[in-house]
Amino acid sequence: MLPLDPRKQKILHAIIKQFIETAEPVGSKTIVISYNLSVSTATIRNDMAQLEELGLITQPHTSAGRVPTQAGYKLYVEELVDFDKARTIANENIKHLNEQYKLKKAKEKIYDAVALLSQATSNISFATIPDNKRTFYLGVSNILKQPEFVENPLKARHIIEVLEEGTSLVKTLESLNIGSTVKIFIGEENLIEQIESCSIIVTTYEIEGFKGFIGILGPCRMPYAYNKALLEEVSRLIKI
């Protein structure tokens, strides 16, 4: 290592860090303001001149600031970088990005599953979205075609309101102690007054570490065995 005193090490570190972040030549004033070195700009300039003599930084013709040389980068990497600190930050960022990636994969699977259920039934299919407990649903047009709701549009409106609000449905499902098997709740069993004329077939899912509910909602007059079998198969597929 070249004989640099602690202050010159800090200045070289500051120049390289700032240049990496901005791609702009670094002046003495920037170092004093940004890196809290308790010395004057004149002292910084003098140290920068010595660092330049050592071949660690250089001054572009078009600027009063300095930029690191390859020798400066080499010294920075070999002697000045806190790799442990950088590793901690990198690991946290990777962990966050990986969680976001897994969440994206989970959401895509859930959206596909809900779409499949909607196409395969004449009812509404829904799922709770894992990151914020919202309810994603498809098939409202299916249920609006059902005689029960054609004759009583208010019932249809209540269903849509419950789905759009989302929270009460999620809380109700959580209170029903639904396990990994498919459960059927007929009429008043679903505990939501606005949709007590409906039945819910529902199960839980877990994808990429995220958990939620997925199910079918429709009038009590529904093909229970068929819908239950559909949900069981879709639930199996999204775990693959």
Image (cartoon, rainbow, N blue to C red):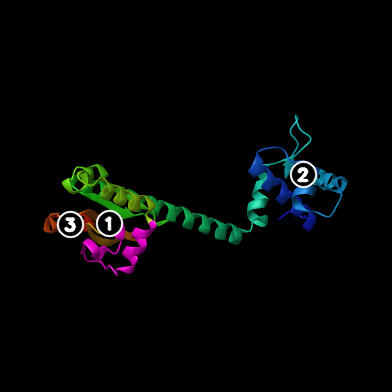
Element class at badge 3: loop
Q: Please say whether residue 137 is visible from this viewpoint.
A: yes
Residue 154 as seen in the image, left or right of residue 122: right
Q: Residues within 10 Å of mark 3 (few under 14, many from 20)?
A: some
Q: Earlier in the sequence, mark 2 or mark 3?
A: 2
Q: Residue beneath label 2, please?
A: 30
Kind of residue at disc 2? Thr
Q: Nearer the viewer, residue 221 or 200?
A: 221
- The quarter of the picture where the N terminus appears is bottom right
Circle nearer the viewer, 1 or 2: 1
Residue located 55% across and 59% down the image: 87
- Residue 78 is situated, as x and y percent measured from the top left of the image, at 64, 55
How far apart are the two marked residues, 2 and 3, measured between alpha carbons? 71 Å
Element class at badge 2: helix
Q: Is residue 150 above or below residue 231?
A: above
Kind of residue at disc 1? Ile
Q: Earlier in the sequence, mark 3 or mark 1?
A: 1
- Residue 45 is situated, as x and y percent measured from the top left of the image, at 83, 44
- Residue 193 is situated, as x and y percent measured from the top left of the image, at 30, 60
Q: Which region shows up in magenta?
A: 167-195
Q: Residues within 10 Å of mark 1 (few under 14, many from 20)?
A: many
Q: Residue beneath label 3, please?
A: 220
Kind of residue at disc 3? Cys
Residue 188 as seen in the image, left or right of residue 42: left
Task: State the count of labels.
Answer: 3
Query: Residue 185: within the magenta?
Result: yes
Q: Nearer the viewer, residue 10 or 196?
A: 196
Judged from this view, the residue extending furthest toward the bottom is 177
Residue located 24% across and 54% down the image: 217
